[in-house]
Each structure stands twice: as structure tokens, then as C-alpha cells.
Amino acid sequence: MTRSFEKVGVVGLGTMGAGIAEVFARAGLRVIGVEADPDALGRGRDNLENSTGRALAKGRLSEAERAEILGRITLTTSREDLADADLVIEAIPEVMDFKRALFTDLDRICKPSAVLATNTSSLSVTEIAATTGRPGRVVGMHFFNPAPVMRLVEVVHTVVTEDGLAEEIAALARRLGKTPVSVGDRAGFVVNRLLLTYLNHAAVLLENGLATRDGIDAAMKLGVGVPMGPFALLDLIGLDTSYEVMCVLFQETRDRRHAPAPILRELVTAGLLGRKTGAGFYDGQAVATPPASGKPTVSSVAVLGEGAREFAARLGDAGFRTTALETVTAGEAEDTLERAVETADVVIALSHTPVIELAARLPHPRRLVGLHLVGDRLAEVASTVLTSPEATCAVEGLTKIVGRVPVHCKDRAEFVVDALLYPYLNDAVRMYDSGYAGIEDIDAAMRLGCGYPAGPFEMIDALGLETVRDGLRALYTEYRDPAFAPAPLLDQLVTAGVRSIRGLS
């Protein structure tokens, strides 16, 4: 049967719960908002009034519209008032014992036809549903904060969800003006499962000394176009929340990439939780901007690798003496290579792979610096164990002269951007291949839930399937982490000559 959702209960009126109540009321539904006690109810009322007040001040609501929205919401401290609700959704703290106790009570109170929904971002919907006598009518309805603004809703179904119910909840989400994506019941669902794994990986790379906090954040913003770098985003989400989600993921998968990075545990234990406490990875200050620098104290530059002539020409226009050598292979004649670099103050190897083998072939390896140009603005500056600090500093200055922001990193496979991006894309392929969610849903979830410029499958098609596959192989060879091995589907598509993974949807 097709259900009619006209009266909705919302349990928990913190920032998220009040936002969800507002969303339903904006869509013309009657809402019953429930809190534990009068003080909490007062805070919930304030949340509703403040949120709609901001919309009024920005011209997004009229006084009459605001009054209508608030007039559709009834506030109470009694769960018994939910007896005739068609749908009840909870937004209480992410503690399984709390949620199980609440759903046991809701099962007793609510009419048999009512649907019970959880706004959990990572906990098992199946485990929550099992506490009720109606597990087939329990679903996940995961809104994103702030709920009145964010368009995404993850609709989570379990193995016992009644046929058609997930589609009805998705239709309800569309009625609310949201974009639903349908997913199975696995820890983290789509957005948190992909996002938090990527953020945790960034923390591991920071601990390993691949690059600095500011460097990694700048690299991902400039190189990929994400709205926030991983550490600024971790601070915004809350390090405690991120740590807890990673613990849930690890408990389900036992994958070491889901084990929370030790630095997360350390910061959380110290009470440094991000913006909510005023300090986390950052101490409340804005992300640092690399300072401008004067002209490097070098006069001659040798540029090696694909694109060397174009890059050398730009440096030549800036007044440097340059030499360019486009191809540098293992079989390159040593005398040709030596002639190209013998008079250069610094040698730049344009590459996206480690350059230490090339450095070892040069007469002056301390002068060699790897440079990976990403997009139009970023330059990853990779120094080897043989590179002198002076050479690194000079190349950083040269990249600024040609209009790029330098990010210094160690000479490791795929440097910074691709070392973070490719495993994230690989995780998305594995997620699709497992039947957990569709390509279009995963892309929509990451665009709408995270503000990414493109979904993971759109990124794969733009980069090229073979490029991503080969990058993952390089990461696996370097780190020997099974998670970095290309997903079998990706390997098969490359072998078959398929050029667009989105064509599978």
C-alpha cells in the first residue's frame, strides 16, 4: 500500500532535530517535536526560532511564511503525543543503547502502521529495527546539517525492510525538496563511508610526514577543487564525531584503513575536538596562506620530463636561463642527460611518480627536485633524501613565479593529491561493485552531501580509468596496502577498453 505521511514526529530538537522539524513543516506537514524535559524543549524552540529568523533576515521567508511554519510545529515533552503520527524520526545522540531504548518505546506508543526512522549517520539501522515488533517498517532517513539547506537525504533500507517502503520514503524526501539516494545498511552509508575514510587517510599521511597540515589542505583544495581541505573539514565535523564514525567502520570491516588514525585519538583524548572547542588540527586561526617570496637566487634551470619545454619557456620569459629535455627514460644516454643539467643551478623533474631513481643518475643529485603540476594552480614540490634544502626552496619560488601555489612533500608514490584521491575513487568503485549503491546515487551523495565539484565516478571518467588504475597500482607497490590494489571491476574495465565507468549505470 502507499502510505500518506501527513503527521510527523521528531524526537530530539538539537540543531539537527530542529532543522528536520523545520524541513517537514516547510513542506506543509504537521510536526510534533519531542524533547526530554522543559529545558531541552526550550532550547529546541530557540533553535527553530533562530533558524527561521535567519531565513527571514535573509529574505528567504516572509513574516507570514515563518508564522505558518512555526504554527505547524507542536512542541511537547511527552512521547505519548506521537501515538497518531504517520512517521517518527529520531535525532538523538549517536549512542546505540539510547536509540534502541527509544525505538522500543516508540514501537509501544505509535500506531501499527507508523514508520519509524532514524537519522543516524553511521549506526546499524538493522540493529535498531530489531528492538521493535515492526522491523520491516524501520528505515534510515539521514539528513545533513543544516537540514533546511542541505539537499541530500540518504534513505537506508535493511534486509527486512518492507517492499516499496524505501521508495515511499524517497518520494517523501522529494516532497520535502530534497534529493534522496537509496543505500543499504552498512556503517557510514555512502557519504560518511567514503568521506571519513578519506579524511582518516589524510591524518595518517600527516603522521607519516608526507606533507604538512597546511600543505595537504591546500593541495586538496587547489588540486581537486573540494571546498575545504581534510583537516579544516575534520575540525568542522568534530574530531570526536569523526573518531566515533571510524570506530564503527572499523568494527564492521576490520580494514586497517578504517582504524582511526592515532593522531585523532590523541586529539580527542586531549579534548581538542575542532571548532566546537576552539582547537583541533587548527587552533582557531585561518588556514595559513603561503607567503609571497622574491625571485629565487638561481639563474639557470634544467627542466626534465613531459611538458618540460612549455614550463621552461615560462621560466625563460621570467628571465631565467633554461634547458628542456622532454624524455628522460632509463635508457636515456647518460651524456645527453648530463649535458642537459651540467650548468643548471637546479633541476626540475616534471613527474607524478618518485624521482629518486633519476636523482641517483645525475652528477649533482642535490640539485634535483620533483614537480607535479595539478590543475591550473597547484604544484607539488617533492624533495628526495638527496635534495638540498636550497634546491627545494628555489623550486618553490620558481613555481610561484609561474603562478602556482607550491606544496612541499616527500618523494613518495603519487605525492599528495593522487595519494588521497585515488583510494577514495577506488572505494567508490568497490561500493558500487558490491551492489551497495548505484553510480548516480553515489555521485549525487558526494556532490550534495560534501559540496564536491564532481562525484567520484565523474572524476574517474575525467581522469581516465587507466590513469586511476595505474595510480592505484603505484600506491599498492609503494605501501603494500591491499586497499590500494585496484578494484577488480576497475581492472576489468581497463582491460576491456571501456572509457566511461558511468556508462554502466
Image (spheres, rainbow, N blue to C red):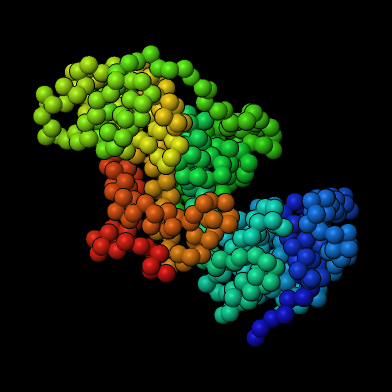
Which is more toward the observer, 26 or 83? 26
Residue farthest toward the top in the current orientation of the protein = 297
Q: Is residue 10 left or right of residue 391?
A: right
Query: 145 or 373: which is nearer to us?
Result: 373
Residue at 55% over, 68% down: 182
Left or right: 414 in relation to 329: right
- Residue 125 visible to an observer of this rendering: no
User: Which residue is painted at 87% across and 65% down in the image?
Assistant: 68
Quarter residue 102 falls in: bottom right
- How many circles with numbers are drawn on the protein? 0
Quarter residue 239 falls in: top right
Q: Quadrant of the C terminus?
A: bottom left
Is 4 situated above or below 391?
Answer: below
Query: Which residue is located at x 52 percent, y 51 percent?
Result: 453
Which residue is at a point 40% across and 48% down the rendered structure image?
423
Q: Position of residue 281 (x, y in %)?
A: 58, 32
Q: Position of residue 198 (x, y in %)?
A: 48, 46
Asked if residue 303 is positioned above or below residue 455 in the image, the reply reads above
Q: Is residue 454 visible?
A: yes
Quarter assignment of residue 365: top left
Question: Would you say 292 lies left or right of 351 here?
Answer: right
**Residue 53 located left or right of residue 117:** right
Q: Residue 185: x percent and y percent?
A: 53, 64
Q: Which residue reaches farthest bottom?
A: 1
State the image coordinates of residue 357 (x, y, percent, origin top left): 21, 29
- From the viewer's side, name the closer residue of 55 and 321: 321
Q: On the rendered image, what quadrant is the N terminus found in?
A: bottom right
